[in-house]
Image (spheres, rainbow, N blue to C red):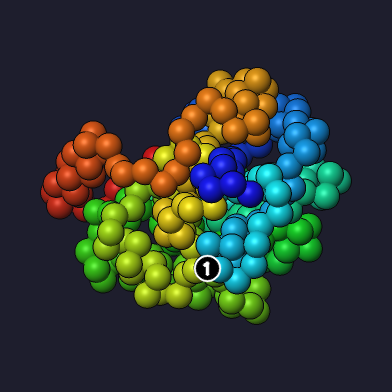
């Protein structure tokens, strides 16, 4: 693969016809989702997991030609059922990042009410060929937290998932992509090998291990958009520096969190 060749890493949330209003923009219908998966199959790209990308970025193993990655955030109720089944029917691996506080009985998260899967179904995802990663405990804006609260989010979610699976959890997704140099460093210290952001850009074989770029799929995106990303067009390619507006927005959110406390990343 040539340097800086674009690698599409798709970010999905829920796949449902009638989602709660707060997440509706970031959902697709089952019909849309099926069309997207068929486009992936028809693209000639090789589907891989975040683990395969991690092995490549760490110099342990090469990627196949023209890879593509499918990722899912939060852990909505459709994930271990029809969504995982649609992937499995097409032989498509994927990576699921789970917000543990929203899945555990009596758990606490900042996610608004929505139909969510439960922790006792995490192993089903692996049986369907999905890799499991952490999406923190509460889905807070990580780059606004104290060191103590950040360590709790990173380490507790990892431990909960490892207990449920009986295996090491290697990968993290920052809620809403919010991160900083400190967040990235503490993610590495917590034992994660990669962390994904959003950035709405193609990743590449030179991307940052703790800020892997993803393409967030919204309900308004068309099949032509998806096909363009699969062709490596329509968006920029990581790595690249944060824009001044992104940095300014981070400082504003930090100031607001100092007054209000941890806030939902969404």
> Quick check: 173 above or below 39?
below
Which residue corresponds to the image point at 56% horizontal and 68% vertical from the top-left? 59
User: Where's residue 126, x and y in %?
Assistant: 73, 63
Q: Quadrant of the C terminus?
A: top left
Which residue corresponds to the image point at 66% horizontal and 57% vertical from the top-left? 63
Q: Residues within 10 Å of mark 1 (few under 14, many from 20)?
A: few
Which residue corresponds to the image point at 51% horizontal and 45% vertical from the top-left? 4
Q: Spot the residue most to the front.
A: 2
Q: Is residue 66 visible?
A: yes
> Quick check: 222 above or below 67?
above
Q: Quadrant of residue 52?
A: bottom right
Q: Mark 1: which secondary structure?
A: loop
User: Where's residue 98, x and y in %?
Assistant: 55, 57
Query: 234 or 130: nearer the eye?
Result: 234
User: Where's residue 139, x and y in %?
Assistant: 41, 53
Q: Is residue 105 visible?
A: no
Q: Quadrant of residue 39?
A: top right
Query: 143 or 17: nearer the eye?
Result: 143
Which residue corresponds to the image point at 48% horizontal and 53% vertical from the top-left? 206
What residue is shown with label 1? 58
In the drawing, does residue 131 fall left or right of residue 159?
A: right
Query: 15 or 207: nearer the eye?
Result: 207
């Amino acid at each position: 693969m040539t340097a800086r060749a674009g690698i599409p890493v798709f970010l999905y949330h829920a796949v449902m016809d009638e989602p709660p209003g707060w997440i509706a923009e970031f959902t697709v219908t089952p019909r849309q989702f099926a069309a997207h998966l068929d486009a992936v199959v028809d693209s000639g790209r090789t589907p891989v997991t975040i683990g395969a990308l991690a092995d490549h970025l760490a110099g342990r193993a090469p990627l196949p030609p023209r890879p593509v990655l499918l990722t899912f955030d939060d852990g909505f109720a459709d994930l271990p059922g029809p969504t995982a089944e649609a992937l499995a029917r097409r032989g498509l691996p994927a990576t699921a990042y789970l917000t543990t506080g929203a899945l555990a009985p009596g758990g606490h998260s900042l996610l608004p009410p929505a139909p969510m899967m439960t922790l006792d179904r995490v192993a089903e995802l692996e049986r369907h060929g999905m890799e499991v990663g952490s999406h923190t405990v509460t889905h807070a804006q990580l780059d606004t937290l104290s060191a103590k609260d950040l360590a709790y989010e990173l380490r507790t979610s990892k431990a909960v998932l490892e207990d449920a699976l009986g295996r090491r959890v290697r990968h993290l997704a920052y809620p809403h992509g919010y991160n900083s140099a400190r967040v990235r460093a503490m993610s590495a210290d917590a034992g994660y090998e990669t962390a994904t952001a959003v950035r709405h850009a193609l990743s590449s074989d030179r991307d940052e291990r703790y800020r892997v770029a993803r393409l967030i799929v919204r309900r308004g995106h068309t099949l032509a958009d998806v096909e363009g990303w699969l062709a490596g067009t329509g968006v920029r390619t990581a790595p690249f520096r944060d824009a001044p507006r992104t940095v300014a927005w981070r400082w504003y959110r930090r100031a607001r969190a100092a007054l209000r406390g941890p806030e939902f990343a969404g």
